Amino acid sequence: MAAMRYATTATKRCTIAFSASHLSPRSPWSISVRPDAPLELLGPLGCGIQTGAGAVLNALKVAAGSSFAAFGGGTVGLSGVMAAYVAGATTIIVIDVVEERLALARELGATHVINSKKEDPVEAIRHITGDGVDFSLESTGRPEIVRAAVEALRPRGMCGIVGASKTGTTFALDMNDVMQNCKVLRGIVEGDSIPDIFIPQLVELYVQGRFPIDKLIRFYPFEEINQAAHDSECGKTIKPVIRIG
């Protein structure tokens, strides 16, 4: 019988398990959800889904009738798309390089998709909107994408950065563009949310059929963990979830 591996790394609000078969969380970090919630779908709400949805609803506060662009069509970006749709944004644009992700973005509420391998995203966004989007969300952690997400804003637009990058990574912006057009750039961690409040709200939206997180998730048996990692990296799967036991 293989030895059990327990998670031992703790942060302020969570226990992090790396290659662990078991997790021993502390009770203050637990969140109550409605009894009929599909528990096997809820794990990703704690990080990627909460990050994208919270960035849109809590931090950027995307408004009804506004325009929104997600730079990156992974778990975070597509969660932002679903949240923007819930918020009532009327123009929702997704930028990615994987066609399967762009197709899924359409299913989740995107009105336009852009493959940045085939066209310049900033030019394409201006063609769609006229003067740029009200809000953009950067989830790739790449400096050149941060710049594009800011350039794609209309005057007085706001860009949220949620993509993680290597410590010390820097990016360059046109200072006159930011200053003269009164653009706002802000960092966002975990969707700027209070998990005890926000995660139950996301569960409620899912149960109502307004936040279909099941379309992001694919389950893999533990024996296929390497395949899950590969499928995630190449874009075949948005959010792989490993079933242990």
Image: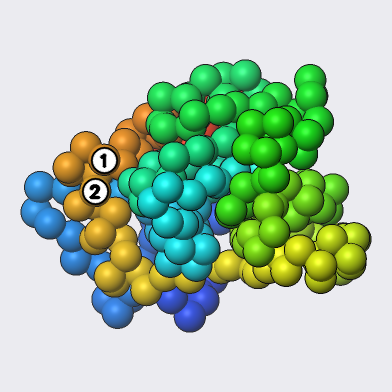
Name the residue at 47% across, 25% down.
106
Q: Choose between 134 and 83: the one closer to the eye.
A: 134
Name the residue at 81% across, 70% down.
179
Labelled pair 2, 1 in contact (Cβ < 8 Å): yes
Instruction: Name the secondary structure under disc 1.
Output: loop
For the C terminus, which image quadrant? top left
The furthest residue to the left? 35
The answer to whether residue 195 is visible is: yes
Image check: 193 left or right of 190? left
Task: Give the image quarter of residue 61.
Answer: bottom left
Q: Choose between 86 and 171: the one closer to the eye.
A: 86
Q: Position of residue 66 (x, y in %)?
A: 48, 49
Categorize mark 1 by other alpha carbons within 10 Å: few (<14), some (14-19), many (20+): some
Q: Amino acid at mark 1?
A: Arg
Task: Give the image quarter of residue 93.
Answer: top right
Q: Amino acid at mark 2?
A: Leu
Q: Would you name the residue on which mark 1 appears?
A: 210
Image check: 126 left or right of 195? right
Q: Position of residue 236 (x, y in %)?
A: 57, 23
Q: Position of residue 73 (x, y in %)?
A: 59, 36
For the N terminus, which image quadrant? top left
The furthest residue to the front? 130
Q: Position of residue 51 (x, y in %)?
A: 49, 58
Instruction: Name the secondary structure under disc 2.
Output: helix
Categorize mark 2 by other alpha carbons within 10 Å: few (<14), some (14-19), many (20+): some
Name the residue at 56% across, 28% down.
112
Name the residue at 73% across, 69% down.
182
C-alpha distance separating marks 2 and 1: 5 Å
Query: With respect to residue 67, does 126 lie above or below?
Result: above
The mark that comes first in sequence, 2 or 1, is 2
Q: Would you name the residue on which mark 2 appears?
A: 205
